[in-house]
Image: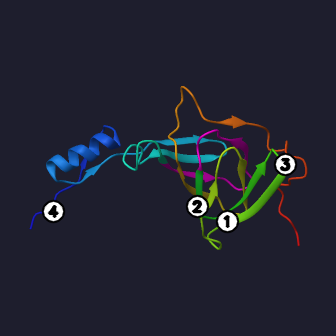
Amino acid sequence: MLTKSVQRFDGSLVDAFARAGEVVEPLFVPSQFFTDDRGWSLMNQMQGVLGAQGQVNFSVQYPGVIKAWHRHAKQTDFWMCLQGHLKVGVHRESDGSSWSLVIGEKRPGTVVIPPPLWHGAATVGPAQAGLLYYVTHAYDPKAPDEERRGHDTVAGFSWEVEHK
């Protein structure tokens, strides 16, 4: 039996999906890294094949980094930390309620964050944290569904480790 190499496809995932079905062969679509001083991400994964609007992303956040606060008008986020641990913060502006939860390797599960809740995450512990997340609306650079504010702008919310 001859084993073939999987062919690289340099188009969109939607086009690869159609082409793989036509040729009845597997195709490899490379992903692109986005990197800055906070960590790195693989964005827009599965876009267009999971439904008309959503996308899957994976983001790695370095120890000590806080990514907060942001919110969406339409998009719901589904967050699952697969590597390390994140302190997730969520804030409801209408009544001033805030929540925090540590998720990760030792506390697996998915946090569902609907609009218009402010949310963010801080890496806790000595390891980087890897966040796999699904969003119900794909990112549109021409009209981002995102509003931002500083990590220290929610009164009474601490991103620090709580010593108990």
Determine whether label 1 and label 3 are within 8 Å by CB. Answer: no
Colour logic: rainbow
Going from N to C along the chain, the mark reached first, 3 or 2, is 2
User: Disc 1 marks which residue?
Assistant: 103
Distance, label 3 to label 4, CA atoms, is: 61 Å
Determine whether label 4 and label 2 are within 8 Å by CB. Answer: no
Residue 120 located left or right of residue 74:
right
Distance, label 1 to label 4, CA atoms, is: 41 Å
* Type of amino acid under label 2: Met
> Viewer-nearest of labels 3 and 2?
3
On screen, residue 126 above or below 148:
below
Query: Looking at the image, which residue is at 71% across and 49% down?
Result: 119
Instruction: Looking at this view, name the residue that lies furthest to the front.
Output: 94
Q: Secondary structure at mark 2?
A: strand
Name the quadrant containing residue 132.
Answer: bottom right
Q: Which residues make up the magenta segment?
A: 56-76
User: Disc 2 marks which residue?
Assistant: 80
User: Disc 3 marks which residue?
Assistant: 95
Going from N to C along the chain, the mark reached first, 1 or 3, is 3
**Residue 23 percent coordinates (x, y):** 15, 48
* Type of amino acid under label 3: Asp
User: Disc 4 marks which residue?
Assistant: 3
Going from N to C along the chain, the mark reached first, 4 or 2, is 4
Distance, label 3 to label 2, CA atoms, is: 27 Å
**Residue 109 percent coordinates (x, y):** 60, 68
Determine whether label 2 and label 1 are within 8 Å by CB. Answer: yes
Residue 142 located left or right of residue 150:
left
